[in-house]
Image: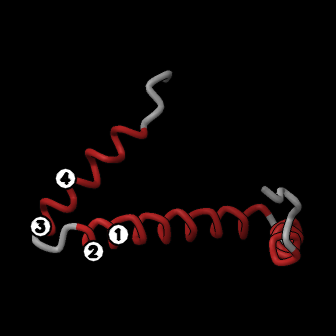
Amino acid sequence: MDLKPRPNHRQYIEALRRMGPEARLRKAFELSEFTKRLFVQGLRDRFPERTEHEIHQLMLERLAKCHNRNY
């Protein structure tokens, strides 16, 4: 497996470094929201027969499995 950073990844990291703290925080929130939407859409695609309420419950169950229980 090649672990060398790809050119686009390096450019992305450089762009993040040029951002101020507020812009980086905004970007973190944007990426978090994007990830959540992808996760929910994946559940909808995998379980098309489920209602929105059931998808929401499934999302919560899956997230609970990922929670770090060391806290």
Mark 2 to mark 1 CA distance (whole Å): 5 Å
The nearer-to-camera label among 4 and 1 is 1
Badge 4 crowding class, 10 Å Cα cut-off, few under 14, some 14 to 19, many 20 or more, is few
**Residue holding disc 4:** 57
Badge 1 marks a residue whose secondary structure is: helix
Q: What residue type is disc 1 on?
A: Gly
Q: Is residue 11 above or below residue 50?
A: below
Look at the numbered discs 3 and 2 and tell me whether their residues touch, using CB distance below 8 Å: no
Look at the numbered discs 2 and 1 and tell me whether their residues touch, using CB distance below 8 Å: yes
Mark 3 to mark 4 CA distance (whole Å): 10 Å
Q: Earlier in the sequence, mark 2 or mark 4?
A: 2
Look at the numbered discs 3 and 4 and tell me whether their residues touch, using CB distance below 8 Å: no
Direction top: furthest residue: 70
Percent x, y for residue 46?
Answer: 26, 68
Badge 4 marks a residue whose secondary structure is: helix
Badge 1 crowding class, 10 Å Cα cut-off, few under 14, some 14 to 19, many 20 or more, is few
Q: Earlier in the sequence, mark 3 or mark 4?
A: 3
The nearer-to-camera label among 2 and 4 is 2
**Residue holding disc 3:** 50
Q: What residue type is disc 3 on?
A: Arg
Q: Earlier in the sequence, mark 3 or mark 2?
A: 2
Q: What residue type is disc 4 on?
A: Gln
Percent x, y for residue 62?
Answer: 32, 47
Percent x, y for residue 31?
Answer: 57, 68
**Residue holding disc 2:** 45
Badge 2 marks a residue whose secondary structure is: helix
Q: Is residue 23 above or below residue 4?
A: below
Which image quarter is the N terminus in?
A: bottom right
**Residue holding disc 1:** 42
Mark 3 to mark 1 CA distance (whole Å): 12 Å
Residue plotted at (27% across, 49% down)? 60
Q: Earlier in the sequence, mark 3 or mark 1?
A: 1
